[in-house]
Each structure stands twice: as C-alpha cells, then as structure tokens.
Image (tube, rainbow, N blue to C red):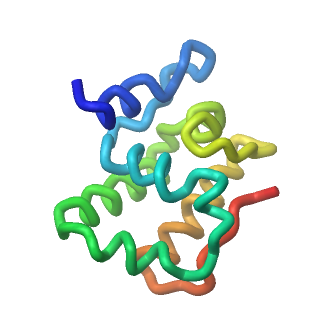
C-alpha cells in the first residue's frame, strides 16, 4: 500500500470513533503543507504551489477538502496527528479548513494562520 494510502487509512486511531480522511491526496497535502511548521509561513506561497501541480491533484485536494467540510469526516485527533497543531474544540479544525478552502480555491486573502 502506498504511503499516502496508509496515512489516509490510519488517521483515525481507535479513540476517534472511526472518523477518517479517505482522500489520500488531501491527507498528503495536509500533512506536508498544513503541518505546524509550514502553516506558520503565511507568505502566500501555498496557493501558487498547489496550483502548480497537475490539475488532477488540485481537483482531488479540492474535492477532498469540500467533502471533509461537508461530512465532518476528520476528528480533531486525526487532524492534530497530521499537522501537530492543537485545536481547542471539534469545530476549530473545520473553521481553519474552511478558511484554507476559501484561500486556496476562492481567492480570499490573506493565507490563514493556524490557531494558537
């Protein structure tokens, strides 16, 4: 199994009530570009970086992000394990992901900072 698929399949751990991130591209994108170290760099590179990848990858990230926001499929624990960012409520990661979606795909400025 590919590393991204393993990461996506095992995000939820036994204490997160089986709420997983099924989209491997989105899981990989979050792990690489929205982790604590990278997320604190709000210089504006993230949108052009994402859109420099193949259209299929960009579409998969967009679809995965919209699906995660719609279905609330990712638990706080799973998101924290991917990013090393701590959230104070179940709603906090979704607030952050929604702002990130608006920045990446709707042209909103500025690039959001992680909570905390």
Determine whether, in the image, residue 66 is placed left or right of residue 40: left
Dividing the picture into quadrants, the one containing residue 61 is bottom left
Dividing the picture into quadrants, the one containing residue 1 is top left
Determine whether, in the image, residue 23 is placed left or right of residue 1: right
Dividing the picture into quadrants, the one containing residue 15 is top right
Where does the image place residue 39, in percent across and percent down from the top left?
62, 62
Where does the image place residue 10, in percent across and percent down from the top left?
43, 23
Q: At x 32% / y 41%, what residue is drawn?
A: 24
Determine whether, in the image, residue 44 is placed left or right of residue 77: left
> Which one is nearer the viewer's eye here, 114 or 21?
114
Position of 7 relative to 34 (above/below)? above
> Which one is nearer the viewer's eye here, 109 or 91?
109
> Which one is nearer the viewer's eye here, 67 or 10?
10
Where does the image place residue 12, in percent across and percent down from the top left?
51, 25
Position of 61 relative to 49 (above/below)? above
Q: At x 54% / y 19%, what residue is drawn?
A: 13
Q: Quadrant of the C terminus?
A: bottom right
């Amino acid at each position: 199994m590919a590393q991204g698929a393993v990461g996506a399949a095992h995000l939820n751990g036994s204490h997160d009530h089986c709420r997983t991130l099924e989209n491997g591209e989105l899981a990989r994108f979050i792990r690489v570009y929205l982790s604590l170290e990278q997320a604190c760099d709000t210089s504006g590179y993230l949108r052009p970086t994402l859109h420099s990848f193949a259209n299929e990858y960009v579409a998969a990230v967009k679809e995965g992000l919209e699906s995660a926001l719609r279905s609330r499929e990712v638990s706080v624990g799973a998101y924290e394990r991917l990013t090393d960012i701590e959230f104070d409520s179940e709603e906090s990661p979704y607030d952050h992901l929604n702002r990130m979606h608006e920045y990446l795909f709707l042209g909103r400025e500025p690039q959001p900072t992680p909570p905390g």
